[in-house]
């Protein structure tokens, strides 16, 4: 299994990347493409689809939706649509909110003893990245998954408040849950380094 992820780059870099991908993937039977949270998914898809030789692609995309209000969801959906229209075999995985995303708040947990979210008591089926990888491995190595789309979730839906309580118990430190506004959450994500275009 080979996993490929590209980020937004100048046209000449993309051209070199496409040539490199062709060389890298020569002779491979199955590949896993993981779209990043930051970057140009349309170019990612174009880089892959330039090599139409019948490989079985599994595209792992997070929150892909054609009607999503989030730019990242719309971009991932665009790549999915290109895969469906291509001559490639495909299986699409749509993992839900990654459990590891909570690590983005590590500095706030350590310094302020708090977990922040604008989700109130809404519940999320957090999924561990290792579980997503295990699902991808099965679809890559076992028959019966071509042309199928799977939503991958954790075993239990939790609110950020409940997640904060679990983290608190694990680290042995009191943590508070701060239910902020959408604007506050957007500003925090920008401070964490995410471009405004994907928030």
Image (cartoon, rainbow, N blue to C red):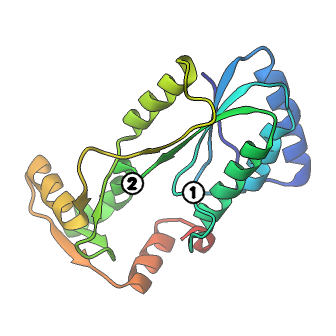
2 or 1: tag closer to the N-terminus: 1
Marks 2 and 1, how far apart in space? 17 Å
User: Can you give x and y, in whole percent of width and height, for residue 57 in the image?
Assistant: 68, 31
Q: Which residue is mark 1?
A: 64
- Label at residue 37: none
State which quarter of the image contains the N terminus.
top right
Residue 58 position (above or below residue 70):
above
Name the residue at the top extreme.
Answer: 27
Asked if 37 appears above or below 196 in the picture, the reply is above
Relative depth, front residue between 18 and 113:
18
Look at 85% across and 54% down and name the residue there: 10
The picture places residue 23, in percent across and down from the top left corner, at: 84, 22
The foreground one among 120 and 199 is 120
Residue marked by disc 2: 101
Residue at (57, 69) in percent of width and height: 68
Residue 69 percent across, percent down from the top left = 56, 74
Between 12 and 151, which is closer to the camera in this rendering? 151
Residue 171 visible? The answer is yes
Q: Which secondary structure, mark 2?
A: helix
The location of residue 78, given as percent across then percent down, is 71, 57
* Vertical placement of residue 27 versus 174, above or below: above
Quick check: marks 2 and 1 in contact, CB under 8 Å?
A: no
Asked if residue 8 shows in the view, the reply is no
Of the residues tagged 2 and 1, which is closer to the observer? 1
Residue at 39%, 58% (x, y): give it. Answer: 104
Q: Residue at x 60, y 50 (%)?
A: 36
């Amino acid at each position: 299994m080979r996993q490929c992820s590209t980020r937004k780059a100048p046209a000449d870099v993309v051209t070199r990347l496409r040539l490199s991908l062709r060389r890298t993937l020569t002779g491979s039977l199955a590949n896993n493409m993981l779209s990043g949270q930051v970057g140009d998914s349309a170019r990612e898809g174009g880089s892959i689809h330039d090599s139409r030789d019948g490989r079985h692609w599994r595209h792992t995309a997070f929150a892909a939706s054609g009607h999503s209000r989030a730019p990242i969801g719309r971009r991932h959906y665009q790549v999915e649509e290109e895969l469906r229209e291509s001559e490639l075999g495909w299986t699409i995985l749509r993992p839900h909110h990654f459990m590891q995303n909570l690590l983005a708040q590590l500095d706030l947990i350590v310094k302020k003893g708090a977990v922040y979210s604008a989700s109130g008591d809404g519940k999320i089926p957090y999924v561990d990245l290792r579980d997503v990888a295990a699902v991808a491995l099965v679809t890559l190595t076992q028959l019966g998954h071509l042309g199928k789309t799977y939503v991958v979730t954790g075993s239990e839906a939790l609110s950020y408040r409940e997640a904060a309580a679990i983290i608190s118990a694990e680290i042995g430190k009191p943590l508070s849950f701060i239910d902020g506004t959408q604007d506050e959450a957007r500003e925090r994500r920008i401070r964490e380094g995410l471009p405004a275009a994907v928030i």
